[in-house]
Image (cartoon, helix red, strand yellow):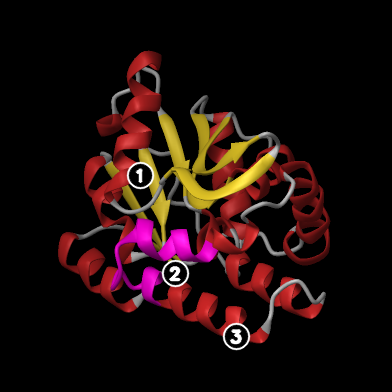
Amino acid sequence: MTPRAAFFDLDRTLLSVNSGALWFRRERAEGRLPLTQAVEAGLWMGLYGVGLLRARTALGRAVRAVAGQSEAELEERTRRFYSLDVASSFAPGGLAAVQAHREAGDTLVLLTSSSEYISRCVQEELGLDDILCMKLGVSGGRFTGEIEQLCFGAAKVTVAQQWAEPRGIDLANCWFYSDSITDLPMLERVGRAMVVHPDPRLGRVARKRGWPVLDWSAASEMEAAGG
C-alpha cells in the first residue's frame, strides 16, 4: 500500500477554539502579561491570522514575551493550560476524522503554527503519529525570544515536504484539513484539500475549486478517508 498521511491544522479545525487567544487570556488573568502587551499580542495575532503581516515578524513579536524564561517551566505551564482550557474543545467531527484515517492506515500528523509544547499535548491526547509545528529558540534551557522553525503559510509546505520525503510519502496522495486562508499553499499542495469551518476568503476559494467544506461541530459529517 502506498504510504499516505492526513495532516491536520489545530486552531478552529481540530479544535473548535483558537488556543492562542485562550493562552493570552490565561496569561493575562494570571498576571504574567501586562495589559499593553496583551493588546499588542492580540493585534499581532489578528493581523497574522488574516495574512496582513509577514508571519515571522508577527509571530516573533508574539513570542518575545517568553524571552529569558525557562523552557521547562513554560512546558509545565502549557500542560496545565491545555488541561484547563483546551482539552475539552476538540471538534467532534475532527475526532471522527482522525479515527477514520487511523482505521484506514494513514499516518496522522498535526501541522500547525502553534508551539511544540501544546502540539505535544494534542499528540498525546489523540495518539497522533507526529507533529510539525513552530519551534522556539532555546539556549541553556531558556528561550531566546527567536523562532527556530516557522510553520505558517508557505513554510508549512516546506516543513511537510521535508518530513514526507524521507518517509516515501507523496503529498499529492495526502489530505490536509484547515479553516484558514493562510493555509492555502498547503491546501493547494496536497491531493485532497479538506476545508473545515472556513474563514470567508477560504470559503470563497473552496467553493470556486470544488473542495469539500466540512462542518465538524458534530461527528456525523465524514468526508475523510475515502478515495
Query: Tag 2: residue type?
Result: His
Query: Residue under circle 1?
Result: 156
Report which residue position mark 3 lands on: 36
Q: Which mark, residue 191?
A: none
Q: Range of the magenta residues? A: 47-62
For the N terminus, the quadrant is: top left
Answer few, some or many: residues within 10 Å of disc 2's Cα (few below 14, many 20 plus, some between 14 and 19).
some
Distance between the Cα atoms at labels 3 and 1?
31 Å
As displayed, is residue 67 above or below residue 160?
A: below
- In front here: 13 or 59? 59
Residue 90 among magenta residues: no
Quarter assignment of residue 57: bottom left
Say which of 202 and 42 sits in front.
42
Q: Position of residue 157 (x, y in %)?
A: 30, 40
**Residue occupied by mark 2:** 197
Query: Hey, what amino acid is under mark 1?
Result: Lys
Characterize the local packing of mark 3: few (<14), some (14-19) or many (20 or more) Cα atoms within 10 angstroms.
Answer: few
